[in-house]
Image (cartoon, rainbow, N blue to C red):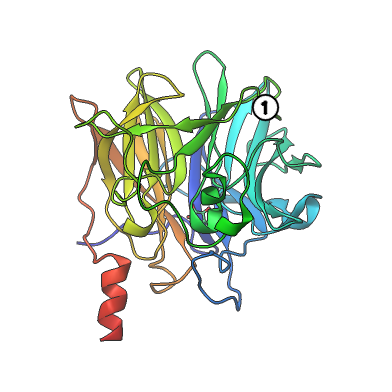
Amino acid sequence: MADKQPFVTHLYTADPSAHVFNGKLYVYPSHDRETDIKNNDNGDQYDMNDYHVFSMSEVGGPVTDHGVALKAEDVPWVSRQLWAPDAAAKNGKYYLYFPARDKDDVFRIGVAVGDKPEGPFKAEPEHIKGTFSVDPAVFVDDDGEAYLYFGGLWGGQLQCYAKGSFDKSQLGANEPSTGNALHAKVAKLSDDMLSLASPVSDVVILDPSTSEPIHAEDHARRFFEAAWLHKYNGKYYFSYSTGDTHYLAYAIGDTPLGPFTYGGRILEPVVGWTTHHSIAEFKGKWYLFYHDSSLSGGENHLRSAKIREIVYDEQGKIHLAEPQPQIKPPAARLEEEDS
Ligand code: FUB
């Protein structure tokens, strides 16, 4: 079965966050680039230094690259690694949220403001106070209240906050192996979208069979990174990557703050280690925006964003509109190469 093709091929694009603004579909991805940095569990190979914004009037139609919307060198607090961004609109302004390492090499989340969906964006001089880790996703509810979701394990440093405050000794590939899994984080945003308006709380994902939080050893279902929140039929869907098991999964809740009950998988493993996505409705259809490394030839950090239609069944469960070609997950593929 032929797989989907990337919708951008002149650059590598990953972590695509999609939104409909003014009747057009805008995608805010990471901009992967080639470097000499060797792959490691810390994610040092993901050494991105700018963002481009893309738009399209139709899914499958021509895609406009609006050029560089923000550069690392223009953000005073950033040292390196512009990772997965997201965008939001409110009060006639557009906001680009982005994670990066600060001058102490600690991941924080920043915001930059623009007058148009495609930017350019001007970054606030400091990161958003109270934020940490990576992968911001902003959801603006129908009542205008905005929520910032974030967090990512290992290279994304979320495990360093397991006890509430930053613990440097937990940098590197560590996460609890027993007890409850670490949770993604959420906070309300202020009306001007530039600061947190509530304490940071846990995005709790419950096991439907026990109504208890998902356990740390349940790597097929626990949150790893790539938070996304969308609303369908009055319910709140929190979706995420399971990291080292390479699934995109989702959980459903009654409020934007959760708790959310695990609902299933959206996508099986793709080519490449990471999997990351967004979900948006455009012209009456729902789409999954995701990435894989097929264009760059396989197991490496150079990823390309793709789009697939999704549908909901009567129970509100998510399904791909067309089946996904099945591949072996990265660990199995690498074992085969070694033997
Ligand atoms: O693109 C860099 C990192 O890889 C993202 O922040 C993660 O979600 C993963 O996709």
Q: Position of residue 335 (x, y in %)?
A: 28, 78
- Image: 137 above or below 23: below
Q: Which residue lies furthest to the bottom in this view?
A: 339
Q: How many neighbours does mark 1 have within 10 angstroms: few (below 14), some (14-19), or many (20 or more)?
A: many
Percent across and percent down for residue 157 are 56, 53
Q: Nearer the viewer, residue 168 or 108?
A: 168
Quarter of the picture containing the N terminus is bottom left
Q: From the image, which quarter does the C terminus lie in?
A: bottom left
Q: What residue sits 51% from the left and 36% below the top?
A: 185
Q: Is mark 1 on a helix, strand or loop?
A: loop
| 115 relative to 43, above or below | above
Left or right: where 60 falls relative to 82? left
Residue 241 placed where, x, y %? 39, 48
Towards the viewer: 146 or 187 = 187
Where does label 1 land, which residue? 193
Task: Please tell me in which quadrant of the rendered image residue 117 appears.
Answer: top right
* Number of residue marks: 1
Q: Please state which amino acid type lies under the numbered disc 1.
A: Met
- Identified at 61% across, 74% down, the residue is 35
Report whether residue 66 is seen: no
**Residue 29 falls left or right of residue 232:** right
Ligand 1 contact, mark 1 (Cβ < 8 Å): no
In the image, 137 versus 186, the foreground residue is: 186
Query: Does residue 47 appear anywhere in the picture?
Result: yes
Residue 176 drawn above or below residue 93: below
